[in-house]
Image (cartoon, grey):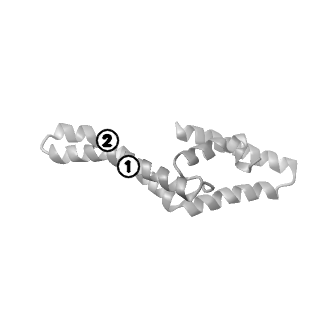
Amino acid sequence: MDFFHQPCYKLSRNFARLIGRWPYQSSLQCFLIGVVIIAAYILQVGPKILADIVHSDDQELVLETLAPTITNIMAFAKYINTWVNAKMLKKLFETIRDDWELVTNSEEKEILKSYAEFGKLLATGYAG
């Protein structure tokens, strides 16, 4: 069984695969998922920005669409950040796996497991 198929890493692995950021996915799969996400982002935010430009004289409309647009821009920046830091993310996953392999004492394994369970809880809360 693959190390990251353990229950405490399943959520992180599945979300990373969903957005094409799992370091062990094929390059083609990561690229295609990235293209779909970027296209969806452009299709969602493009019309909002265009509407703001066309109706720039309508302050109420601009203010109404400002919050969702900023939220979308921040989400896209977060996605780009995962793309830029893909090598660091892969190194992080490899370090986690290596740390588990180094530990031989059952007490230390329990400590790592408790941290992994807490990380799962944080990932669940982060995912919403």
Of mark 1 and mark 2, the one earlier in the sequence is 1
Which is nearer the eye, 46 or 92? 46
Disc number lying in front (1 or 2): 1
41 to 81, vertically: above or below: above
Q: Secondary structure at mark 2?
A: helix
Residue 87: image location, x then y, percent = 58, 63
Q: Identify the image quadrant of residue 48.
A: top left
Calculate the distance from the C-alpha at mark 1 to the C-alpha at mark 2: 21 Å
Q: How many residues crowd mark 2 within 10 Å: few (<14), some (14–19), many (20+)?
A: few
11 relative position to 1: left or right: left
Residue 23: image location, x then y, percent = 60, 56
Numbered tag placed on residue 49 in the rendering: none
31 relative position to 40: left or right: right
Check disc 1 and report the residue beneath it. 39
In the image, what residue occupies the spot 86% across and 48% down?
106
77 relative position to 100: left or right: left
Q: Identify the image quadrant of residue 101.
A: bottom right
- Amino acid type, residue under disc 2 in the picture: Ala
As drawn, the residue found furthest toward the front would be 28
Check disc 2 and report the residue beneath it. 67
Q: How many residues crowd mark 1 within 10 Å: few (<14), some (14–19), many (20+)?
A: few
- Amino acid type, residue under disc 1 in the picture: Ala
Q: Secondary structure at mark 1?
A: helix
In the image, what residue occupies the spot 53% across and 40% down?
127
In the image, what residue occupies the spot 70% across and 48% down?
4
